[in-house]
Image: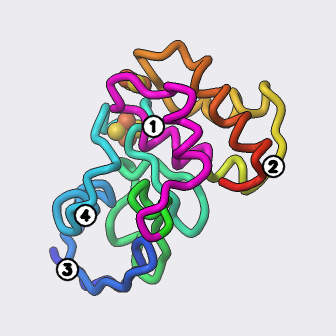
Amino acid sequence: MKHEIDCIVNDQAHHLTVASHETLLCMLREQLGLTGAKNGCATGECGACSVLLNDEVVNSCLVLAVEADHATVVTVEGLADEGELSTLQQSFLDHSATQCGFCTSGMLVAATALLKQASRPDVNAVRAGLAGNLCRCTGYDDIVKAIMAASRARRT
Ligand code: FES
Ligand code: FES
């Protein structure tokens, strides 16, 4: 069964036709070409598919596209401002917080939400904020350092 939905993705309005079983992740990647959110596990375990849905971090592999009807979605592609990296994105670069990069978009989305909730989180709060995002490369330390530095810069 098909459904018509209206949503705002990265500040752009979309009218889309989605299947009942279609996930938000599929809709973003295959209909809108926003491939920043990754399909790692498709079971809600890894966080590589993290996006903001009405300002809340969700695993887009577990959210149906129809749930985005009349909602606002932000993906990693929406974090930069007119091509200028956010402070958090720049901090990931500065701290070498990326290796293979598969987890990075989800990490950036989760950390952006974290820094909106707590402007100066401590290390434990940062680690807790990333609890739903797995990284098999970095050992997390450089990611945490990047987020802490961005929080000190007071802009995400
Ligand atoms: S792909 Fe969604 S949580 Fe892993
Ligand atoms: S950088 Fe490779 S999974 Fe995180």
Is 2 on the left-hand or right-hand side of 7? left
- The residue shown at (41%, 15%) is 137
Q: Are marks 3 and 1 in contact (CB under 8 Å)?
A: no
Q: Quadrant of residue 120?
A: top right
Q: CA distance from mark 4 to mark 3?
A: 9 Å
Spatial separation of the CA atoms under disc 2 and disc 1: 20 Å
Residue depicted at 73% across the width and 34% down the height: 148
**Vertical relation: 76 (above or below) 13:** above
Neighbours of disc 2 within 10 Å: few (<14), some (14-19), many (20+): few
Q: CA distance from mark 2 to mark 4?
A: 30 Å
Ligand 2 has an atom within 8 Å of the beta carbon of the residue at disc 2: no
| Of callouts 4 and 3, the N-terminal one | 3
Q: Is the distance from the Cβ of mark 1 to the nearest ligand 1 atom less than 8 Å?
A: yes
Give the residue pinned by disc 4.
27
Instruction: State the extent of the magenta-drawn residues as a range.
Output: 82-111
Q: Marks 4 and 2: in contact by CB < 8 Å?
A: no
**Rounded to the nearest whole Å, what is the CA distance between mark 2 and mark 3?**
37 Å
Under tag 3, what secondary structure? strand
**Lower position in the chain sequence, tag 1 or tag 4:** 4
Residue 83: where, in percent of width, then height? Answer: 41, 64
**Which residue carries the number 3 mark?**
17
Give the percent coordinates (x, y) of residue 1.
15, 74
Residue marked by disc 1: 47
Q: Amino acid at mark 4?
A: Met
Residue 61 in sight from this viewpoint: yes
Q: Quadrant of residue 33?
A: bottom left
Which numbered tag is attached to residue 118? 2
Residue 40 location (% of width, % of height)? 30, 33
In the rendered structure, which amino acid carries the disc numbered 2? Ala
